[in-house]
Amino acid sequence: MKKVFVDTNILVDLIADRKPFSKFAIELFSKAESGNVSLYTSSHSIATTHYLLKKYLSEKELREVLLNLLDFINIIAIDIDVLKKGLKSKHKDFEDALQIISAYSIEKIDCIVTRNLKDFKDSEIPVLSPDEIIEQL
């Protein structure tokens, strides 16, 4: 089974139903629900998703959606070690460094899925767009 790290923009696409991108996020999470792929993200992504979407959904609804999402995605904690590695990393964007380092902590991770491919160009882990990962599953 593939292990896929999901970047924040994919979570936002899914919950906000940002078309045309949401179709790939919906399909990816459907495959996770049926047990065909194992999804991961960072605790930072959950917090950032909440922050970005609180303008569009009520607090109660957003918390419920995020809580339900946790049934289909494994969370990697952003702890002091991840923060230190991120701050010392060669990656230009600190948030992306945290994502890459979080993904790297997953044994036998297959890829990171994001729509910001250029921001992950220095990743040691293969980076795919949402449509590319759907083609592979």
Image: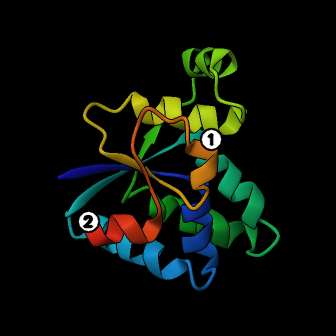
Which residue is depicted at the point 42% across and 72% down?
A: 131
Q: Which residue is mark 2?
A: 136
Please tell me which of labels 2 and 1 falls first in the chain: 1
- Residue 75, x across and y down, in percent: 45, 42
Q: Which residue is mark 1?
A: 44
How many residues crowd around disc 1 within 10 Å: few (fewer than 14), some, or many (20 or more)?
some
Amino acid on which the number 1 mark rests in the picture: His
Assign a secondary structure to mark 1. helix
Quadrant of res 96: top right
Assign a secondary structure to mark 2. helix
Quadrant of res 86: top right
Give the Cα distance between marks 2 and 1: 27 Å
- Residue 14, x across and y down, in percent: 54, 72
Asked whether disc 2 touches disc 1, contact meaning CB atoms under 8 Å apart, the reply is no
- Residue 20, x across and y down, in percent: 57, 85
Amino acid on which the number 2 mark rests in the picture: Gln
Q: Which colour style is shown?
A: rainbow
Q: Is residue 6 left or right of residue 107?
A: right
Which residue is depicted at the point 39% across and 53% down?
A: 73
Which residue is depicted at the point 56% across and 62% down?
A: 11
Which residue is depicted at the point 51% across and 59% down?
A: 67
Disc ID at residue 76: none
Q: Decide if residue 25 is in sight here.
A: yes
Q: Decide if residue 29 is in sight here.
A: no
